[in-house]
Image (cartoon, coloured by chain):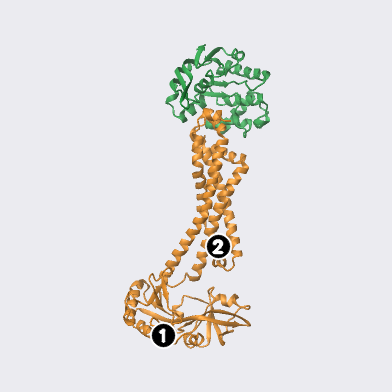
Amino acid sequence: MNILKCLKHAFNMVIHAKLRSWLTIIGIVIGVGSVVAIMSLGSGMQASVNDQFGNLGGDILTLSAGYSRSAGWGGHFRPRDSSSANSDDDLTRTDLQVLKGISDIAYIDTNIRGNADVVYMGSDGTVSVTGVDQKVWSHVTTNEIADGRMLDSADQNVVVIGGRLASDYFDDPVLLNKLLTIEGSSFRVVGILDDTSTSIYMPLQTAYSILEDKERDVYDSIVIKVKDENNLDAMIDKIEHKLMLSRHVTEKDRDFSITSNAQINETRSEMMSSMNLFLTAIAAVSLIVGAVGVANTMFTSVIEKTKEIGIMKAIGARNSDILSIFMLNAAFIGLVGGILGVLVGTIFSTVIPMFMGSMPFARSGTLVTLDSVIIALTVSVAAGLIAGFIPAWQASKLDPVDALRYE
Amino acid sequence: MTLVKLQDVYKIYQMGEVQVPALRGITLEITQGEFVAIVGQSGSGKSTMMNIVGCLDKPTKGIVRLKGQDISRLSDSNLAVLRGHTIGFIFQQYNLIPSMTAFDNVLLPLELQEMNDAQARKQANKVLEMVDLGDKTHHLPSQLSGGQQQRVSIARALAPEPEIILADEPTGALDSKTGRDVLKILHNLWKSGKTIIMVTHDLNLAKYAKRQIELKDGHIIKGG
């Protein structure tokens, strides 16, 4: 029997067992829908994170007090204790001088960071304030200006603010040249960043006066822009070597860390991929349950159709004809389940973020990619075929005499 | 020309640890154009013989040749193809596929033989007309009487134009008038040149056949 005729008979099997077929299809729909929804939420989250952090420059190094063995997000980072001002591992002017002595460094930006109370037009909040070296910040930062300008060397009581702080943090949007009250002092907004942060950036010396627990000439981090991005590893080694000498520490008791944005990007990407894989694996369990449903339906179908299989064999059906009909039946269930699953998954991945407004993916939306659709359909058909194979094989191997006798 | 030849055929069923012989050394030849009735009491081995003659089953011992081919040496698929082309089955309980219309039931063996669509449809209509069911082609088996269902079954058996029609108790589920009608059809088919092998326990029906083979306890006791 040719494949089209087999397909016709497979389709008729589905049509004549409507309820059972639909129940089986629902199993696949749930499985595929979960996989698609999870994958698209994951893609959306990844896109959102990339959007926020993706353009971190590869030529930027960050020097921090405290030491992380892996120097990455997953490492055992021992941060500088902010309460222990004057401790030995602080980053100070001495470190800055050491760095200034390294010829391959293009810019060095010294930072301090803390939280501060901010009031704007009667509404208030606590946000992160970063003091930066305004002379070099615009060269080092990966942030871009949406409106206004960056800080410059003559600035004092001015700030540049994050995009979200400007747009929806306070009751009223913060416009350019408006005044923000930070820890009781007024600051004029000269720039709004093109990002989704609520951060405030101000000149370093001004920040020392705002963040009272910060000691002058002690930095939370030093951001370094190297001249040659391709020589990053050698530069890290060189900086580490010089700093260890000046700070009188060895590899064993070193008290500072250098992280590169390239490293952070890589770690972040690995973390997102692992998380996506983990979530997809959880969703895939429901697909496996769906496939077991297909197998169950197919076994029932073979038992129910035993006599018909005997009749077909008596009138000339080959084993391969029976096998094809049952396999196509299973594949058809898988395909219909897959298509509906993609639709349901897409709908869910569109609806879920509406109920999770503050989650990262909710801001950039979810992303049903062509890849995930193709994978979902392929997996659902494959699940149908795998689940249907043993029942179909059993059907094809039925003895015609026994099958005809079956009641 | 010999169509079916059985040489010293045994069929033994294993029932747990006990061996139950259903056929014991059957030797038989059926030539083209014969109308043969295989008769016998219940348990005589006639159903087993029908299965073996119809290539639905293989003997435990001995040789069965269909159109000269030893069926024991054929693969399941080749046997299915040979069966489909050579033998048309008519069953006591009609054995129609309930979800298919009369037309689709008749079309099925032609689809299995991969006959061209237009030709297959024409042939299916032709055989349904032949059994006076031209107006019932789109009826499901459940919408037909027993006699009509058996005529659909005959049409299905005739559709691939087989040389042998193998009828297993073809009137067993029908009233006597409808049974006579079915026998009339079989008789006409025989007259048209088909080889008819009919299995029955009813000696009155067997009289319609030109040769009667009687089985008892797995042996041929008459007409072999």
Q: Please identify which colour was used for chain A in the image.
A: orange
Report the amino acid beneath label 2: Thr
Residue A3 in sight here: no
On the image, the x and y values in percent for residue A202 come to 50, 83
Measure the alpha-carbon separation of dots 1 and 2.
47 Å
Report the amino acid beneath label 1: Asn
Q: In the rendered image, which quarter contains the C terminus of chain A?
A: top right
Q: Name the mark on residue A366.
A: 2
Residue B157 in sight here: yes
Depth check, mark 1 against mark 2: the one in front is 1
Horizontal placement of B132 versus B108: left or right?
right
* Residue position marked by numbered label 1 in the rendering: A86
What's the chain of the residue with tag 2? A
- Image point (57%, 21%), residue name: B167
Q: Residues within 10 Å of mark 1 (few under 14, many from 20)?
A: few
Q: Quadrant of residue A332?
A: top right
Q: How many marks?
A: 2
Asked which secondary structure carries label 2, the reply is loop
Reading the chain from its start, which is encountered first: label 1 or label 2?
A: 1
On the image, the x and y values in percent for residue B39 come to 56, 15
Query: Is residue B134 shown above or below A343?
Result: above
A253 or A348, nearer to the observer: A253
On the image, the x and y values in percent for residue B89 come to 56, 24
Q: Which chain is in green here? A: B
On the image, the x and y values in percent for residue A378 come to 50, 50
What's the chain of the residue with tag 1? A
